[in-house]
Image: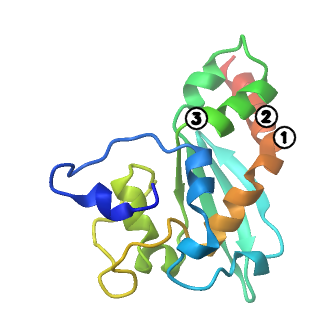
Amino acid sequence: MTDHNNYFHDDHPHILDEVFYKDFMAEINPNNLPHRDYAPLIPFVRYQGTQNNTMKYFVPNRYNGWNTYIQFVDWNEQVADESINPQEVARLLLWSGNIRVHCPCPAFKFWGSQYILTQLDAAIVPEMRMPHIRNPNLKGIVCKHLNRNLKVLPFHLGDMASAIKEQRRNLK
């Protein structure tokens, strides 16, 4: 996944591929960013809630912060399957489920992360404009907020399991 230019040839106008958590983590690399890695400066990530198949997190910055979103494409199928306990479903979704992400910060759009993820079918909100000015080489895959959020996502498995339990209760 490192060389994004291979994904944008005319032979493959739309890549409909699954992107897993491990794919994001393999791509999040300080050497593969269009700018300095600011993610270590972010002190924490706070879980805000889950709506349908999308988890919302708050990532603070110096003055306010940004809400980031992680969507689990296979969420509804897994929630409906009550033969698996919620903790195991959370692990399945994280480690082998197709995910999509979004951050409303300007860097996510203008540095090209949203465009790259749209081409990989991993953006919740699609962006079709290529970042010709800020990131013409298409380096990096997420902004610093999503970078930090994805790095701590395994620590939020309990939040995922609680959301799954709640949704299962509401299905009955």
- In whole angstroms, how far apart are the C-alphas of marks 1 and 3? 17 Å
Marks 2/3: CA–CA distance: 15 Å
Whether label 2 touches label 3, CB < 8 Å: no
- Coordinates of residue 56 in the picture (x, y in percent): 66, 55
Q: Are marks 2 and 1 in contact (CB under 8 Å)?
A: yes
Q: Earlier in the sequence, mark 2 or mark 3?
A: 3
Q: Observer-nearest residue: 91 or 161?
A: 91
Q: Earlier in the sequence, mark 1 or mark 3?
A: 3
Q: Position of residue 137 (x, y in %)?
A: 36, 76
Instruction: Say what secondary structure mark 2 lies in.
Output: helix
Q: Which mark is residue 11?
A: none
Residue identifier under label 1? 158
Q: Which residue corresponds to mark 2? A: 161
Q: Is residue 11 left or right of residue 64?
A: left
Give the percent coordinates (x, y) of residue 158. 84, 40
Image quadrant containing the N terminus: bottom left
Describe the element under mark 3 as helix, strand or loop: loop
Q: Which residue is mark 3?
A: 97
3D distance between C-alphas at marks 2 and 1: 5 Å
Q: Residue at x 71, y 66 (%)?
A: 148
